Amino acid sequence: MGEQNIPNREKGTFTSSKIHPTVIETVRDCIIYNSGSRIEMSDDALYEPYGNGTEIGLLRFLTDNEISIHDRYLMR
């Protein structure tokens, strides 16, 4: 099996790629379960991550790729 480069410069490219859904779920769970950041509702009724800058970036990566984090975040 060779390397596969997945360009991720636009929103949604991670989930629309040919990556196996199990891998996407594993990445999601690793990011969420290893994050110390919190999710709060913003003034415009959107859930926003707050905390460590790197963790916020990873959580935004998930949401930019239309991966729901709120329900899974509550379960951790």
Image (cartoon, rainbow, N blue to C red):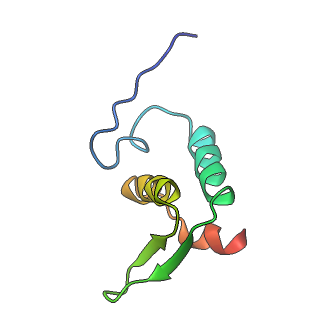
Q: Residue lying at the far right in this picture: please name it.
A: 76
Image quadrant where residue 46 sits: bottom left
Q: Could you tell me which residue is drawn at 50 percent across and 14 percent down? A: 3
Q: Residue furthest left?
A: 10
- Assign the N terminus to one quadrant of the image: top right
Residue 33 at x, y percent in the picture: 68, 58
Q: Position of residue 25 (x, y in %)?
A: 61, 48
Answer above or below: position of 58 versus 5: below
Give x and y (percent) for residue 73.
Answer: 62, 69
| Residue appearing at x 42%, y 41% in the figure | 14
Rendered location of residue 26, percent (x, y): 65, 45
Count of picture labels: 0
Give the position of the C terminus as an image quadrant.
Answer: bottom right
Would residue 66 be found to the left or right of residue 21 on screen?
A: left
Q: Nearer the viewer, residue 19 or 60?
A: 60
Q: Residue at x 41, y 35 (%)?
A: 17
Q: Is residue 5 above or below residue 26?
A: above
Q: Residue furthest top?
A: 2
Q: Does residue 35 appear to the left or right of 3 in the view shown?
A: right
30 left or right, relative to 37: right
- Name the side, left or right, on which 45 lies relative to 34: left
